[in-house]
């Protein structure tokens, strides 16, 4: 990777915003997308980081994304609301939805906002984190276009459908989970094709749905759990589809226009998201919650490790460590993104 | 299995109730536990079915379980409540909590009830199903005593920590997911020991936390995803612990008295559960939800199957099929349970 350079976060964020603005994005949607991409790039989730700016800029220019969306929210009950994202950038909708969910939860103990007419939202953890920063547990799901087989199925049906959750930890960075319900993302298959490397067993299938380790033969992903226990990953993918799309009125995965593998870059995709905030103060109470969380995480991090060099980690520990390194050393940028951002 | 017999559901339920009543359980807690055990036995989840009646009866007699619990609920906000289960049978607490959550959701769009001082609740899907039968999406989690290693950890830390979700389907049985966040339950290890059979790869570890297929060497389970992707299953287990115990004030998994592998049968375990109900009417609306759900499930069941003989199934399809068979043929009962129930 001799062509990788690192860039200071402030410089990088300004370039991302400028690129999105140049593609027509409104100031507020460009700011939200920049924040979400920088979140992912800071914590080391480069697949969902600033490299996506070029894709979003193309979609803004070619009509799939509404560059100047007007978000419409409707409060439907004491604990619920719906948000119409007006086919704009999904990050903008998700930040606003979680902000609303947190406000509702402060009143009602829980708040959930269902989002329709949205688009790709990057790393779902970005929005769960917002809840944790406000002292709430946040849960976010997003559906996506079909590239994961159902259990024992022979065509792609569900998206990689992430589940993210963040929980506040007093005096520490939040507990932070963000996982696709497949074992790997499809980009990993493309990477292994280009490297001519075999895939791990049980993560992908050929055109007939048969498990394969041949990256060139792989046509779809298998759900988390693989050929034996993939009914669990497939079930979780379905949970995400139901919460994000069936419940909200968004397009379900098998009907959704692909994010990248399509010539249609002018039709909106109507992705759905679901954001839930939970206020610990309305359950055991804030002080008891904080004490229990500190005890739980302390015990987890003391578990003897089977890895030679690293301790057992809680979800998010690795990401926060990466964020500390990148705050010091800058954020590594691949050559294509570097060119796109003029760095 | 020449010693297996089948029993009519009505006869079986009466025997289970009588056994629990004979062990001191109040009429309402015996009724709730019978309903939950019969639910699992009807749908073929025999590990969580009527075979557990003998265990519960012993715990009622030996003091771990309060036979005559007085449930206390406290509404804490428009969408939230807490329920103190008074160390009684977990099934009683979970049915009451989900009933309350559904009532709250009917008013507020969402309802969540956190349960403390509870105990083993059998199959978490039983309570999620109650929400679906009331037209709501139900989600239930329960923590449990430690027998699953964290990712790259060398001691058991999390319970098998189930996540259950049920979603209503107009004119059909609900979509119904109920999964442990480990690949297999620890009982499977015991079964394979007795059969002298090797375990599948990637589901269990030896005393040093190293993956093993030797059932005799297996000392703990690995999280869903196994040695490569177990950080996902471990993260989901943590999600369950946080929602069920940290949020509610219940005992976290590593501190919890084992359900079976202990001589302590007189101390209450303070298991925690979390029940959430979501009203589709407050999101896309009931009619649109029902249409989208029917379309989604129709497409899923039409996916070409890689299995020779069976179609692709939605979560719950296999269970509802079993329930139809067992309604006709009776419920198979193992010899120990048969003796315990006097059948």
Image (spheres, coloured by chain):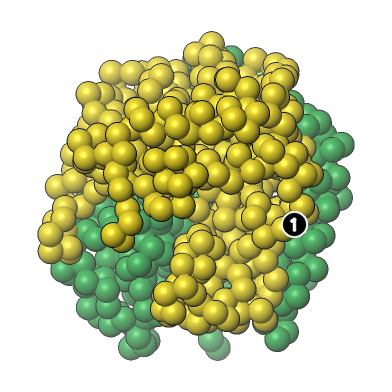
Chain colours: A yellow, B green
Quarter of image, res B291:
top right
Does residue B172 appear in this view? yes
Secondary structure at badge 1 equals loop
The image shows residue A317 at horizontal and vertical percentages of 26, 43
Residue A129 lies, with reference to residue B333, above or below; the image says above
Viewed as shown, does residue B298 lie left or right of B34? right
Residue B85 lies, with reference to residue A332, above or below; the image says above
The image shows residue A29 at horizontal and vertical percentages of 59, 25
Residue A41 lies, with reference to residue B173, above or below; the image says above
Q: Residue at x 65, y 28 (%)?
A: A24
The image shows residue A306 at horizontal and vertical percentages of 17, 64
Q: In which chain is the residue bearing label 1?
A: A
The image shows residue A99 at horizontal and vertical percentages of 53, 20
The answer to which of B85 and A189 lies nearer the viewer is A189
Does residue B119 appear in this view? no
Q: Quadrant of the C terminus of chain A?
A: top left
Q: How many marks?
A: 1
Quarter of image, res B100:
top right
Viewed as shown, does residue B220 lie left or right of A86? left
Q: Residue at x 33, y 56 (%)?
A: A3
The answer to which of A57 and A120 lies nearer the viewer is A57
Name the residue beneath numbered marker 1.
A263
């Amino acid at each position: 990777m001799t062509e990788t350079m690192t860039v200071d976060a402030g410089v990088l964020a300004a370039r991302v915003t400028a690129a999105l603005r140049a593609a027509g994005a409104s100031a507020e949607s460009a700011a939200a997308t920049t924040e979400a991409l920088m979140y992912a790039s800071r914590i080391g989730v480069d697949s969902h980081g600033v490299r996506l700016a070029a894709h979003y800029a193309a979609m803004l220019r070619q009509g799939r994304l509404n560059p100047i969306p007007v978000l419409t929210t409707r409060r439907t009950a004491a604990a619920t609301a719906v948000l119409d994202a007006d086919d704009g950038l999904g990050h903008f909708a998700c930040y606003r939805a979680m902000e609303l969910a947190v406000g509702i939860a402060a009143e009602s103990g829980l708040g959930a906002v269902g989002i329709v007419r949205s688009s790709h939202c990057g790393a779902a953890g970005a929005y769960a984190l917002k809840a944790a920063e406000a002292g709430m547990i946040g849960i976010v799901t997003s559906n996506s276009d079909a590239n994961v087989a159902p259990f024992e199925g022979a065509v792609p049906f569900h998206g990689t459908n992430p589940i993210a959750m963040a929980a506040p930890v007093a005096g520490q960075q939040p507990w932070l989970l963000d996982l696709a319900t497949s074992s790997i993302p499809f980009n990993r298959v493309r990477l292994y094709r280009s490297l001519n490397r075999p895939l791990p067993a049980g993560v992908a299938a050929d055109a007939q749905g048969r498990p394969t380790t041949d990256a060139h033969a792989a046509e779809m992903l298998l759900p988390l759990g693989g050929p034996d226990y993939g009914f669990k990953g497939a079930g979780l993918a379905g949970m995400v589809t139901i919460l994000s799309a069936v419940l909200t009125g968004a397009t379900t995965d098998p009907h959704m226009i692909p994010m990248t593998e399509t010539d249609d870059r002018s039709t909106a995709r109507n992705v759905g998201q679901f954001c839930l905030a939970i206020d610990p103060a309305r359950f055991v109470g804030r002080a008891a919650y904080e004490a229990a969380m500190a005890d739980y995480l302390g015990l987890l991090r003391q578990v003897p490790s089977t890895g030679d060099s690293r301790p057992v980690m809680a979800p998010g520990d690795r990401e926060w460590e990466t964020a500390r390194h990148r705050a010091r050393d800058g954020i590594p940028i691949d050559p294509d993104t570097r060119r796109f951002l003029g760095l």
